[in-house]
Amino acid sequence: MKKIKSIIYLIVGGALLTSCGDSYLSPQPTSGITSGNFYQNASEVEAALINMYDGIQGTNSTNTSDNHGVMYEFYLTEMRSDNTQTKSSEGEAAEFESYTITPNNGIITDYYSSFYNVIARANVVLENLEVVSDASTKAAFEAEAKFVRAYAYFNLVRLYGEIPLIDKTVSPLDTETQFTRVSTDNVYNLIVSDLTTAVAGLNNTYRTRASKAAAQALLAKVHLTRGNYSDARSLLESVMNSGYSLESDFKDVFYNENNKEVIFAIGYAPDLTSDSQNFSGEWLNAVGRTTGVNYVTADAKAALDAMGGNRTLYSYRQDAIQNQFDQVVKYLPDGDENLGIAATSANPNLAGNDWIVLRYADVLLMHTEAIMAGANETSDAAALASFQAVRDRAGLTDAVSSVTKQELLDERRVELAFENHRLFDLIRFNEAENVLSSFAAANGHSFSSSDLLLPIPQREINLSQGLLTQNAGY
């Protein structure tokens, strides 16, 4: 992904303050140039747009003072589901698999601060649009910034519940805005409003930046989460008529980047510290700096073996060093000759594998879900066609005459395994408590309904001097 010049980082980094206190002012301003007087034209505002994606991309490091963006998302999603686990069951990472997360966990703090930082970057763009003289460019920039802000808030509200709603740049003294939690309805209202603007103002030029189809697909997922099925269906059918399609070979979804199935991805470039990622290396053994995390559970392996079809080969493999464990292979940075996968970088810690947020198979399965509309089963022809297309690509070509909610949930699990969807799917299908309680009990863990939300980071509560409250159960 294109990086912006250091002066932009200085300006944006120095100008932004969100709910994490002074740590967001890094690097500190060292000149009289500020966000208030820097942005003078469309090119400078576009540089700030690119900076939003850099925030999502995160910093490739193991430094606890850095924001790691989406690179840490698998801990909060896949490892809190029945899909993945750590190798050693030790340290902060293991708190996610055992449902023993504490408010002092550095990973939840990193994700919270990362995505509020992304929101702050988007707010900077929105507050400087007046310098963009061309009306169409201005509208496109607004749409793109609102897509990114909505994406960040959608992740945060699903993970943390009621959260502060910051829709403007704030000063260090504006503690009420920074630390007052608002209802999830209010957060969703902003998400829907932002994505509606994004749909109206974007086209389908990009795959690693916001697009119209990405906004439509994300808004559809928001509507599914809120039970607005007819709105979701209409949006999804618009995406289905926008030129995207399934890759014929499942492997190519992940190893032929910017392919026809990708709707929105976080772009990474290999062998550049500023643009690479390390998480895919850390999923392996003796490659990453924090090895043996996000290993495949026996439960997920059994599901893929039974229902994955030709997807299974490109979803997990046995760890050649620790034979009792299985590794995720959708994002192998060091390649695999046996699977016909080439290495993406000379150094697996500087991996260039893009992270796919939205892809066409997800859209097709959401389309089936929207038509099902909360029922336990559907035989609607359009729903079956979307469901069948995903299965056909997996080599599971037996015709289906109906789809149950459980079959759809299973299909989403094996199609989108290890792509950070499973936990959110279980919650949206109202199956999380049943599935995760049984899974936890079978693996010696203890799960309760309060574990569906993460704790608000203790650091934030301390900074708020008690204004910010904690989630139940923590």
Image (cartoon, rainbow, N blue to C red):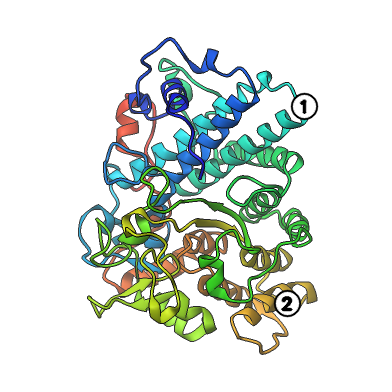
Q: Which mark is residue 384?
A: 2
Q: Which mark is residue 201?
A: none
323 or 78, which lies in front?
323
Say above or below: 124 vs 345.
above
Kindly report the distance in space between the C-alpha atoms of the residues bearing marks 1 and 2. Answer: 43 Å
Asked if the residue at tag 2 contacts the one at tag 1, i.e. Cβ–Cβ closer than 8 Å, the answer is no
Residue 217 visible (yes or no): yes
**Residue at point 47% right, 61% down?**
423
Query: Neighbour class for label 1 at 10 Å: few (<14), some, many (≥20)?
Result: few
431 or 215, which lies in front?
215
Say above or below: 269 vs 123.
below
Q: Which mark is residue 135?
A: 1
User: Residue 103, how many percent across, how many down?
Assistant: 30, 43
**Residue at point 38% right, 47% down?**
272
User: Residue 145, how many percent across, how many down?
Assistant: 61, 35
User: Residue 209, how many percent across, how many down?
Assistant: 60, 45
Three-letter amino acid code of the residue under disc 1: Ala
Three-letter amino acid code of the residue under disc 2: Leu
* Of the two numbered discs 1 and 2 in the rendering, the one whose residue sits closer to the viewer: 1
